[in-house]
Amino acid sequence: MTDKFKDECGVVAVFGHPEASKLAYLGLHALQHRGQESAGIAASDNGRVAVYKAMGLVADIFNAEALARLPGTHAIGHTRYSTTGDSALLNAQPILVECNKGRIALAHNGNLVNAAELRARLETQGSIFQTTSDTEVIVHLVALSREVSLTQAVCDALRRIEGAFSLVMLTGDRVCAVRDPRGFRPLVMGRLAVPGRPDAVVFASETCAFDLIGAAAVRDVKPGEMVVVSRDGTESRHYAPALKPSSCIFEHVYFSRPDSVIFGRAVQDSRDALGRQLAREAAIDADIVVPVPDSGVTAAMGYAAESGLPFRLGLIRNHYIGRTFIEPEQAVRDFGVKLKLNPVRSVLAGKRVVLIDDSIVRGTTSRKIVRMVRDAGASEVHMRISCPPTISPCFYGVDTPSRRQLIAAEKNVEQIRQYIGADTLAYLSLEGLRNACGEGIETSYCTACYTGEYPTGFIPVDDIEPAIAKC
Ligand code: AMP
C-alpha cells in the first residue's frame, strides 16, 4: 500500500527491432510499479550508444522528442525507486561508460551485498566512482578485468560480485542479459515477430512488459546464466555454476504485478492460493471479506472463496497520488492514509470484517486502516496477512526499513494485534506461503525477510542501513 519502502527496479531489453527504444519505453511503462523515481533508456544505432534518463515517471520523461534521440535497433531500459543513499539523477540508470573494452550501458535490478567492500578496494586501486549506486562497481570491475574481450570481462566481473542481480547490458552490436547464480530477482526472455526480419529478442523483469509490446515469453534467464544476443544469434553461457535457487518470495506476495508470470508461476495463482491457505489456517466467524487495495485484492478473493464469506470492496483506493500534498492546518486524523483509501460506510457499517493485506512492515498503515474501518461502523475487525511476520530486512533489493523499525522483529503477534487495534490478527505460516507459491523441485525461494536466514551467508548487522544506494 504505502510507497515509502519501495526500492525495487524494473529492467527491459530489446534486440533487433527498428523501434527498439519505443518498445523499451512501453516495457518500462508496464514495469512502472517496480520503481517510480527515475527512468532511462539506452539505445544503439550502428555501433553508437546513446542514453537518456531523468527523474520522474516513464510517461512524463519520454516524449516523442526524447525517443527520437534514441534511434537504433537495440535498446535497454530501467526504472527505479530508491529511498536509501542518494536518489538523485546521478544514480539513475542505465549507466553508460566508455572503457578500454568499449562502450557499454548497463541496467540492474537487485542489490549487491559485497558492493561496499569491492568499492573500497577499487578506490584504493585508483578507481573514481561517479555515483553512489552499487551497480557502478560492476562497470569498474569490467574495465579492470584482465580479459580482453568484453564478454569475457563481463563474466569475470560477474564472478566477483555477490548478491542479487538481474542485469541487462547493451553495446554497439549486442544485448546481454544476466541473472545471479541464486536467481533472486526475476528476468524473462521473449520473442517478438518483426515483419520481413528475424524475430526480435526481448528481456524484461516481468512478463507483463511482453504483453504490452506483443512479445511471447520464451523462458526465464537461468540463475548463473548470461544470454548474449548478437547478429549471429542467441548464445547462452554459464559464467558461474547455478547455486540453490533463492527466488524472492516477496515478488509473489507483493511486488510483481498479478498479471505476470515470474519464476515460472503466475503471480495471480500464487496470491489466490495465499488467500485460500490463509482461510484454512486462520478461519474466523465474520460477515464479509474486505481487501486492502490493491495489494490485498487477490488474496482476499482467495480467502473469500475458501471461507464462503462474501467478498466486498469496503475500501476504495485513489490512484492519483502525487508526491506532496498540502495538509489542512487543523490536522485531519490519518490524513496520509485517507489520501489513498476511503472506507465505504454502506459496506462496512455493522459488519464483522475480515480485512486482508499482504504484509505489515512498520504497522503504522494497518493501525490507521483498522481505525478507519471501525470509524466507518464495522462491529469487528479481523486482520489477516497473506505472509508470515516480516522480522528481517531484505538485502537483495526490496527496501525494508532496519530491523529496529520492523514491528514483528520487536513484538509478538498478540502485541502487534494490540498495536494495530484489531479484534484478532493472524499471519500465514511459512510452510503455507511456500506451498502457495509452488515451492518444489524446480523452485526454491529466499524467505530471509521471514526467517532471518540469508542465502548468501551475509550476516547483516542490526540497524545498519546499506551504505550505498540499492537498486
Ligand atoms: P506499514 O505501515 O509499514 O506496516 O506498511 C504496510 C503496507 O506497506 C502494506 O499495505 C504493504 O502492502 C506495503 N508494503 C510492504 N512492503 C512494501 C515495500 N517494500 N514497498 C512498498 N510498500 C510495501
Image (spheres, grey):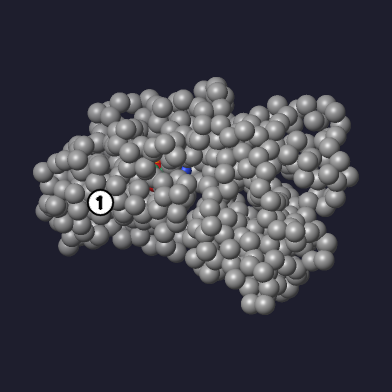
Q: Is residue 366 visible?
A: no
Residue at 17%, 62% (x, y): give it: 346
State the count of labels.
Answer: 1
Residue 312 picture quarter? bottom left
State the residue in front, 290 or 76. 76
State the residue in front, 117 or 417. 117
Instruction: Please state the horizontal and vertical placement of residue 200, each as a whole percent of the image.
Output: 64, 66
* Element under disc 1: helix
Q: Residues within 10 Å of mark 1 (few under 14, many from 20)?
A: many
Image region (quadrant) for ligand 1: top left
Q: Is residue 115 above or below residue 272?
A: above
Please name the amino acid that badge 1 sits on. Gly
Quadrant of the snapshot with the C terminus:
top right
Residue at 47%, 47% (x, y): give it: 263
Instruction: Please state the horizontal and vertical placement of residue 377, each as a whole percent of the image.
Output: 16, 53
Residue at 63%, 42% (x, y): give it: 225
Residue 148 picture quarter? top right
Query: Relative to 127, is 156 on the left or the right?
Result: left
Residue at 19%, 40% (x, y): give it: 280
Residue that sits furthest to the bottom in the current view: 196
Instruction: Please state the horizontal and vertical placement of residue 109, each as a whole percent of the image.
Output: 60, 46
Q: Is residue 158 visible?
A: yes
Query: Relative to 459, is 100 on the left or the right?
Result: right
Instruction: Please state the horizontal and vertical placement of residue 213, each as a whole percent of the image.
Output: 55, 68
State the residue in front, 26 or 409. 26
Q: Is residue 149 above or below residue 338?
A: above
Ligand 1 is within 8 Å of the C-beta of the residue at disc 1: no
Query: Relative to 328, is 276 on the left or the right?
Result: left
Residue that sits furthest to the right in the current view: 100
Give the residue number, with chain letter if any, for mark 1.
302
